[in-house]
Image: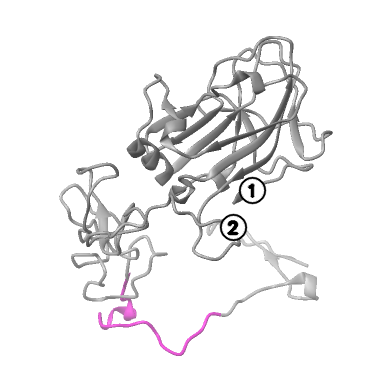
Amino acid sequence: KDKLILNGDSRGVHISDINGQIHSSEFDYSKPGMVTFSEPSYQTMYWKLPTRFLGNKLTAYGGELAFDIQYSCTGSVNNEPLIVLRGNGITLVHRPTDKHMFTSDQIIRYTINTYEGNFEELDGRPATRENLMMVLANIDMMLIRATHCYGQQYTRLGDITWEIAVSRDTQERFALEVEHCSCPPGYIGLSCESCAPGYERSLQGPYLGTCVPAQHRVQCSTSGARSTHPGYDGKCQCKMYAVGTLCDRCPPNTFHLSPRNPQGCIPCFCSGVTQQCTSASGYYRTQVAIDYRRGATDQLEITTSDAHSPFTYYHF
């Protein structure tokens, strides 16, 4: 199970609207095991769950989602979605069928099994298995309703658990509702939801898109090109002293191609007697330094840079 126990810490839970826009993270922890939000709101707010409940949750299919809620108000319970799942551009919601279980000032343990029959689209159309599997393949937002009625004084959330499946003995029941598909070449995952190494997702095809052999993409040299991405003509744009299709070589009479050098390579100087050179071998960097903190006693001189005026020296 993915489990979140809220005991003196929100553990990444926030208050947001139904679109996931965060409005507050200021909570009260006076109720053990629960997080309390007491600020007034004129719209339906939601508990936004942390990243551990996001991503690929295909193995949660058929698993139980459970959480504790508590609130205080005198009005009737609203009909806004209690649970919101969003992924791959699809939003599914769950609305309770039995509102009588919602009682003010009482801790309510709410449970739901992760089947498409328990969810619907925002416009009320029943969710399909394809819808739910697409959402579970990459959840990017999961919400639990925080505003339950008008004039609400406080709202609380606690002890959130969601059953997933793992490939080890957990001493709990088998996850027989989770499919294990025989994937064709190019696909991997329990539901063939991922592309195999050497393949990439195309924009065509069903559901998530077809996995096709990955295209070789040119990457320009990080040392000799102005950008690692080719230009609109498909060619790499080389620095002044860099050549080659990928800008990965020095032109004649230059040496040492480096990403730190804005010109790429270094032209040979050689006192003008030759243009053939390479990087010097066997030489290492050191420093010429004056460190007065370590007791250096070197004397400095102050002089003018005006060659037409006599130099004036000040000795220290």
**Quarter holding residue 67:** top right
The main secondary structure of the magenta stretch is: loop
Q: Residue at x 45, y 34 (%)?
A: 86
Decide: is 178 above or below 95. below
On the picture, is 78 further left or further right than 240?
right
Is residue 49 one of those drawn in magenta? no
Q: Where is residue 152 shown, x and y percent of the image?
A: 71, 15
Q: From the image, tell me which residue sits under label 1.
A: 3
Report the amino acid beneath label 1: Lys
Q: Residue at x 74, y 19 (%)?
A: 104
Decide: is 144 above or below 199. above
Question: SS at mark 1?
Answer: strand
Cα–Cα span, label 2 and label 1: 15 Å
Q: Nearest the camera: 256 or 95?
A: 95
User: What stretch of residues is rendered in magenta?
Assistant: 266-285
Q: From the image, tell me which residue sits under label 2.
A: 172
Q: Earlier in the sequence, mark 2 or mark 1?
A: 1
Is residue 275 one of those drawn in magenta? yes
Question: SS at mark 2?
Answer: loop
